[in-house]
Amino acid sequence: MKKFTKFISHKPKFAIFIMTILIIPSFLGYKLTRVIYDILSYLPKDLKFTQGQEILDKD
C-alpha cells in the first residue's frame, strides 16, 4: 500500500488522468440507466397480487 500512495503522491497528474478516464464510463452508466419506481411493473401479470392491485387501481 505504501508503494501505491507513494506513486500517487509523486505522480499526481497521472493519478488525475486515470481518475478522469474511470469517471467517463461511470457517468455514461449513470445517465443511461433507466430507473422504474413502479415495483409492480416487474411482477408477472398472472400473479394474484398484481391482478388484485390492478382492480384496486381501477376503482
Image (cartoon, rainbow, N blue to C red):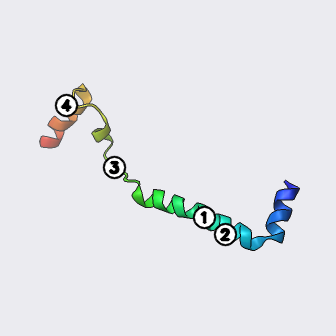
Mark 2 lies on a secondary structure that is helix
Q: Earlier in the sequence, mark 4 or mark 3?
A: 3
The residue under label 4 is 51
From the viewer's perspective, is residue 52 above or below residue 7? above
- The one of 42 and 16 positioned closer to us in this rendering: 16
Left or right, 26 with respect to 58, comes to right
Residue ID for mark 1: 21
Q: Which label was assigned to residue 17?
A: 2
| Mark pair 1, 2: CA separation | 6 Å
Q: In the image, is 6 to the left or to the right of 16? A: right
Q: Point out residue 55 in the picture as x, y percentages from the top left corner.
A: 15, 35
Mark 2, mark 4: which one is toward the viewer? Answer: 2
The amino acid pointed to by label 4 is Gln
Q: Quadrant of residue 33?
A: bottom left
Q: CA distance from mark 4 to mark 3?
A: 19 Å
What is the number of the mark on residue 12?
none
Disc 3 to disc 2, C-alpha distance:
34 Å
Q: Amino acid at mark 2?
A: Phe
Where does residue 5 sit, x and y in percent of width and height?
83, 61
Q: Determine crowd level at label 1: few under 14, some 14-19, many 20+ residues with C-alpha closer than 10 A.
A: few
The earlier-in-sequence mark between 2 and 4 is 2
Q: Disc 3 versus disc 1: distance between alpha carbons?
A: 29 Å
Q: CA distance from mark 2 to mark 4?
A: 53 Å
Residue drawn at (12%, 42%) of the image: 58
